[in-house]
Amino acid sequence: NRKVRARLREAEKKVLDARKKNVTASDGNVAYLGGFAMPNDPAEQLKLRGYHMVSGAVDIGMFRKAALEDVKRFKEAVMEIGEEEGEEDDEKDKEDDGYWSE
């Protein structure tokens, strides 16, 4: 997407310009560039443009796998929490039934 690439180049330029001007945050930290190498934007080009950390194509697959595992764990946790809440509600309903029938 051309617009996305243009925005990325704009952000890169701002970070690099800030580093050239030695602009630091109040705690003394400065911004660094990092990203993923892609077929149309190889690691060598990223390094030449001033990136400090570049991940390769293999890292993208590992990142995707880790993200999918996180989503799966989250969905399982939501289901378990829902089951626990449902069990408590069932017990409470049984208690309420006894109270109202007396």
Image (tube, grey):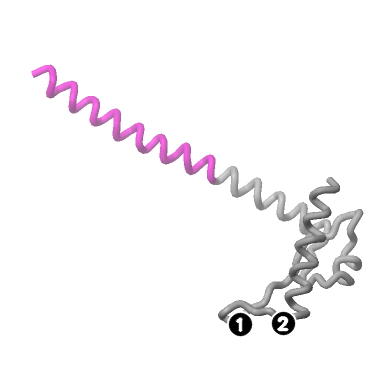
Q: Residue furthest left?
A: 102
The residue under the point 41% across, 36% down is 82
Separation (CA) of disc 2 from disc 1: 10 Å
Residue receiving disc 1: 28
Quarter containing the N terminus:
top right
Residue receiving disc 2: 22
In reply to whether residue 92 is colored magenta, the answer given is: yes
The residue under the point 81% across, 48% down is 3
What secondary structure predominates along the stretch shown in magenta?
helix
- The three-letter amino acid code for the residue at tag 2 is Asn
Vertical order, 74 against 21 (above or below) = above
Which percent across, then down, holds residue 31? 69, 73
Q: Residue 24 is drawn in which quadrant?
A: bottom right
Q: Of 19 and 35, which appears nearest the observer?
A: 19
Which percent across, then down, holds residue 26? 57, 79
The residue under the point 61% across, 82% down is 28
Q: Residue 59 is drawn in which quadrant?
A: bottom right
Q: Return the disc, 2 or 1, that comes first in the chain's sequence.
A: 2
